[in-house]
Amino acid sequence: MAKSKGKSSAAKPSKPSKPRPSSSSLSSSALLTLSLAAAAAAYAAYVLRAPPPPPLSPPAAGGLSPFEQRQQGRTLPGADRPACADAAGCAGVGAAECAAPAVASRCCASCFRATCVDLDAACVEKAQRGACYLEAEYMNATCCHACSPDPEDPCSPDPRVRPRVAEGDLGKIFRRGVEEYPQYAPRVYSEDPWVVGFDNLLTDEECQGVIEAVGGKNGEYLKPSTTAQAVKENGRIVLRDVPDDIRTSWNAWCQHAGCYNHPIHERVITRIMDIVGLPHDYAEHMQLLKYGPGEYYRLHHDWIPEQLQALCGPRVFTFFLYLSDVEEGGGTRFPYIKDKDGKPITVMPRKGTAVWWAHGLESNPWQKDDRTHHEAMPPIKGVKLAANYWIHGSDFKGSMAAGCDGRSGVKGRVWRK
Ligand SMILES: O=C(O)CCC(=O)C(=O)O
Ligand SMILES: [Fe+2]
């Protein structure tokens, strides 16, 4: 689990005060108390036990810096969730046995299931709407299971931790970005949904630096573009990059050392994340795009629905950079967002400018805002170079490093709705 989602903000269950009698002689309210106390004991055992899991694979000999390792997804940075599994002989243990700390610890998974229960039929639905942090007191007392990460799935989010971008945050984030960075010439194309341009974000040198950092000096990292598609493999939904007629551009990802160690790339992503006001690790690796005349990306949304179940959560923003001038064509068109004359917004590519938009709703960033569908119109004359910087409301790079960005499979539970 990512460091930024540490346990400190999660409500801690209280400790059981004294040994409990056997359940057979108890009234229903005493049973409820027992169940909650046992849940607390089992949960405390689960949270307090065991060291963090080892790295996915050992760091390369000869030493990449922690920053480089993280960029490459070689470690589990911030993995602070202890493993929770049963030792032999735990089958059938019940709440009463789990009240004993030794049993709760040895039979972590079974005791979690037996004792951390939901007492309200609406717990899951409420948890999926953020109630575990919005109504923490009630939910902690009532919805132990729905408000806990799955102890056997290290990729499950902790529903008690409010992500950095949650209900009611989008407007504040966009307004701050516009108000605090006049030097980049912000321009508000739309407030509902938010689409903000920056007419003076990057110098020519910075545009060239980004192109070379991500794409390579001679464009050697550029490949025909693909899209992420969900496929079922061995019973799990996994994401695969597949060629797709919807998109005929070329792209390269900043996932090589020449890129993420490049000082201009670093300067540019720092500028973007300063404007957005989120930690660097919340962003995906930058993706460079190249469109020759006639190449395009048809109407689509940048939302990846499978990420609703992933530790990183869905993409919340696209911060899109224009890195070349295009003689004719090549705009980014938002057909469902109208300007003051009632015409769909089209942001025209101009070197050094940018456009930033949101993917989810202000009231619920886990719900896709269909109005931010968009398309890349083909350049008619000239070549368009641009870059995507996709940003999540939680730690993306940590999630990716842990194999929890939704690519390598999500379990059945839907964490947000
Ligand atoms: O090239 C553009 O204008 C937009 C590209 C885009 O929407 C994407 O790559 O997801
Ligand atoms: Fe897009």
Image (cartoon, rainbow, N blue to C red):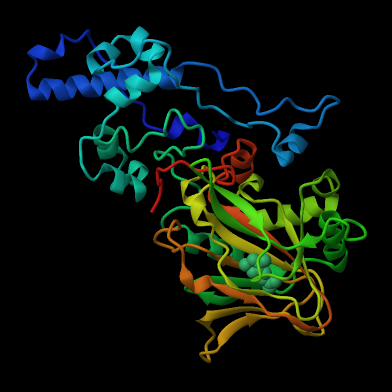
Task: Judge left or right: residue 275 versus residue 200.
Answer: left
Image quarter hosting the C terminus: bottom left
Q: Give the residue at the far front of this rendering.
A: 234
Judge whether residue 185 can be spotted in this image: no
Viewer-closest of 275 and 397: 397
Q: In this view, does 326 lie above or below 386?
A: below
Q: Which residue lies furthest to the bottom in this view?
A: 341
Quarter of the N terminus within the rendering: top right
Residue 410 vs residue 26: left or right? Answer: right
Quadrant location, ligand no. 2 = bottom right
Residue at the extreme right: 218
Q: Is residue 232 visible?
A: yes
Tell me which corner region of the image, top left, top right, bottom left or bottom right, holds residue 168: bottom left
Q: Residue at x 84, y 61 (%)?
A: 211
Vertical position of residue 267 compared to residue 16: above or below: below
User: Measured from the top left, where is residue 187 in percent x and y?
Assistant: 63, 75
Q: x, y percentage for residue 365? A: 45, 58
Q: In this view, does 154 lie to the left or right of 403?
A: left
**Relative to residue 255, is residue 327 depicted above or below?**
below
Q: Which of 149 and 135 is in front in this view?
A: 149
Q: Which of 337 and 239 is in front in this view?
A: 239
Q: Which residue is drawn at 33% across and 45% down?
A: 127
Q: Position of residue 120 (x, y in %)?
A: 20, 40
Image height check: is 372 above or below 243?
below
Question: Quadrant of residue 397 in the image?
Answer: top right
* Residue 249: % across, % down: 74, 69
Name the residue: 24% across, 18% down. 95
Identify the residue at horizontal 87%, vertical 58% (top origin): 212
